[in-house]
């Protein structure tokens, strides 16, 4: 039967099933082992060699190089990995993703997939519905694996037969007769397919099945695999679009690594294919009796799937070995290709760490924590602006501080909205109890930081009215306010330090409580003294009201600062 529209619909549906299964599987293991994956990525990247192994290990576990590269970009974005460290991880991710091809070759093509799918469902579904916590997510992982196999089976069954589509087969063979130009064409096709399906694993599955059913010669399939290596870099590039300059450079390193590898392999492809063919044929011969091949399938085509998987692995390993000594050069090229300085004043109000794509909440919390710490640092700056405004007698400087406080108050509003919106998107995903508690803490922290911005804006308006009315603080009033501001600054420093602690569970609130107590004591003393002196000679009542407003407002700032630490330790 000739290939038609209905066949195309079937292939699209089977491919969607495969991708959906892979997503469920990857999300399940990320939820089950999210914190461990973060710890591995943070602790095992001290040098480029460990970074390669880490990238390989994580990708082999989550079965998605895209998840690893996006996670790596987010860690670079959060300042937890350097560019050199991220380069090693991404190189390792390229090797790790070759495991998928071997799984498909060994289990996904030549053996009836129902032998695996239904037992996986039998184990996974009870775990998913009957368990809580990590066991539930391991059940989700098994269900995803089962769906992946069913999708792969349907994908294989939907492929058109050769006998009814000889014209299409002849076209492929004809196009393959132009040497390096043919290879470049199929590299482009592989890249386009990967971009369209947004999964190099899905693109690899399609290629393997086309080889298995006899549609693609080995050299054509190998060229498509090279293109798939280019196509997968789009994911990291897209993830970095809303990231900072360093994140963009990290994604660019990944792209250059793959592009350079494809460039030299396109030239060497015929020689590498010949060498791999001999190697795999010798190995296959040793285990020939143990490998089952379906009826009506040419054993030579089945053998080609192993050759293609071996090519995929060997290419990525060789590319890592060749490029690893030149990581510093890749970093320099990435720096040149992505110039920029993100320390400009215009960038203060922009999200710095989140926005690199929504992924599982367990892997997104690290970016959220860094973003909230950044939010805290921005809010703490307002204390310095207020101090300058209170103590300045220069009209130009006063106007500058008034505008700056207004600007930063707008920034705090904007940051709270954007962080909350990001968390709302995360909440659409299933969240583990521990991650849910952390997200609730972060939500409360953002609310308190935004309220601090509001209070400083109110302080600035009170000072502005004082200036307009030509009211003046007595020296002792100004000195007392400065002492209170100094205590507030100390509290801010403790708060920011707590926000920058990677593991909230290690934060204690002793220092924060002591700072809050000191702020309250000064406020109580100032209130008592102010109340005694109101109505007295040479003590302006209008100024006294503004003075009372200021130290009361600064004490409220202290309240919100201690609220932040209480949210970090899980008390709110």
Image: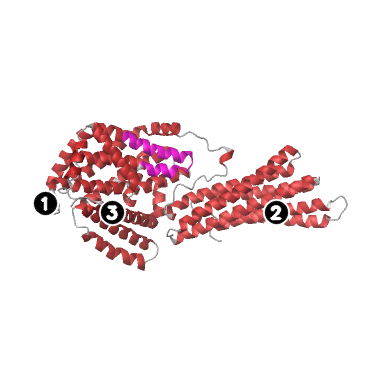
Mark nearer the viewer, 3 or 2: 3
Q: Which mark is residue 553?
A: 2
Residue 358 relative to residue 272: left or right: right
Instruction: Please provide percent x and percent y for residue 176.
Output: 21, 36
Instruction: Please provide percent x and percent y for residue 501.
Output: 51, 50
Crowding at mark 3 (Cα within 10 Å: few <14, some 14-19, many 20+): few
Callout 3: helix, strand or loop? helix
Callout 2: helix, strand or loop? helix
N-terminal-most mark, 3 or 2:
3
User: Magenta segment: does it hold 367?
Assistant: no
Instruction: Please provide percent x and percent y for residue 494.
Output: 59, 50
Give the main secondary structure of the magenta stretch.
helix
- What residue do we see at 17% from left, 50% from top? 161
User: Magenta segment: does it hold 243?
Assistant: yes
N-terminal-most mark, 2 or 1:
1
Q: Is residue 256 visible?
A: yes
Query: Cα distance, mark 3 to mark 2?
Result: 65 Å
Callout 1: helix, strand or loop? helix
Q: Which mark is residue 289?
A: 1
Q: Which mark is residue 466?
A: none
- What residue do we see at 53% from left, 52% from top? 419
Query: Cα distance, mark 2 to mark 1?
Result: 82 Å
> In terms of image quadrants, where is residue 398?
top right
Pointer 3 residue: 9
- What residue do we see at 28% from left, 63% from top? 121
Q: Which residues are magenta?
A: 233-261
Q: Is residue 512 visible?
A: no
């Amino acid at each position: 039967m000739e290939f038609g529209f209905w066949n195309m619909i079937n292939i699209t549906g089977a491919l969607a099933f495969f991708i959906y299964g892979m997503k469920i599987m990857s999300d399940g293991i990320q939820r089950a082992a999210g914190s461990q994956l973060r710890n591995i990525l943070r602790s095992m990247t001290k040098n480029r060699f460990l970074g390669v192994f880490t990238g390989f290990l994580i990708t082999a576990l989550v079965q998605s190089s895209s998840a690893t590269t996006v996670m790596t970009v987010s860690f670079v974005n959060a300042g937890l990995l350097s560019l050199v460290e991220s380069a090693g991880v991404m190189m390792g991710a390229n090797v790790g993703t070759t495991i998928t091809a071997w799984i498909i070759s060994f289990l996904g093509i030549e053996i009836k997939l129902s032998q695996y799918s239904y037992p996986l469902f039998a184990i996974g579904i009870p775990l998913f519905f009957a368990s809580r916590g990590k066991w539930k997510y391991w059940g989700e992982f098994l269900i995803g694996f089962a769906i992946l196999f069913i999708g792969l089976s349907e994908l294989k069954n939907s492929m058109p037969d050769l006998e009814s589509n000889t014209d299409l087969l002849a076209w492929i063979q004809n196009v393959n007769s132009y040497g390096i130009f043919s290879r470049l064409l199929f590299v482009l096709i592989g890249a386009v397919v990967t971009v369209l399906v947004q999964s190099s694993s899905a693109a690899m599955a399609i290629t393997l099945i086309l080889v298995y059913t006899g549609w693609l010669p080995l050299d054509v399939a190998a060229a498509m695999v090279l293109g798939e290596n280019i196509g997968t870099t789009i994911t990291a590039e897209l993830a970095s679009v809303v990231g900072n300059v360093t994140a963009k450079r990290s994604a660019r390193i990944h792209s250059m690594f793959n592009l350079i590898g494809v460039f030299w392999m396109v030239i060497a492809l015929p020689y590498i294919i010949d060498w791999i063919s001999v190697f795999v044929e010798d190995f296959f011969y040793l285990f020939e009796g143990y490998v089952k091949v379906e009826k009506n399938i040419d054993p030579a085509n089945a053998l080609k799937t192993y050759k293609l998987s071996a090519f995929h692995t060997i290419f990525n390993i060789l590319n890592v070995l060749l490029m690893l000594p030149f990581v510093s050069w890749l970093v320099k090229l990435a720096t040149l290709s992505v110039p920029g300085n993100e320390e400009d004043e215009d960038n203060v109000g922009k999200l710095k760490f989140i926005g690199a794509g929504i992924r599982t909440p367990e892997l997104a919390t690290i970016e959220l924590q860094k973003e909230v710490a950044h939010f805290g640092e921005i809010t703490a700056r307002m204390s310095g602006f207020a101090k300058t405004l209170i103590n300045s007698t220069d009209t130009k400087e006063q106007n500058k501080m008034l505008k700056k406080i207004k600007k930063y108050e707008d920034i705090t509003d904007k940051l709270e909205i954007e962080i909350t919106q990001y968390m709302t998107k995360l909440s659409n995903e299933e969240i583990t109890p521990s991650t849910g508690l952390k997200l609730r803490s972060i939500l409360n922290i953002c609310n308190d930081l935004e309220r601090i911005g509001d209070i400083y804006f109110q302080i600035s308006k009170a000072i502005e009215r004082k200036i307009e009315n030509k009211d003046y603080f007595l020296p002792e009033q100004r000195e007392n306010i400065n002492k209170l501001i100094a205590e507030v600054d100390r509290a801010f420093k403790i708060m920011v330090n707590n926000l920058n602690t990677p593991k909230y569970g290690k934060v204690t609130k002793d220092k924060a409580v002591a700072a809050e107590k000191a702020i309250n004591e000064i406020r109580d003393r100032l209130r008592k003294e102010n109340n005694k002196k109101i109505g007295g000679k040479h003590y302006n009542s209008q100024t006294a009201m503004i003075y009372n407003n200021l130290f009361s407002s600064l004490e409220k700032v202290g309240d919100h600062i201690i609220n932040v630490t209480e949210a970090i330790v899980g008390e709110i």
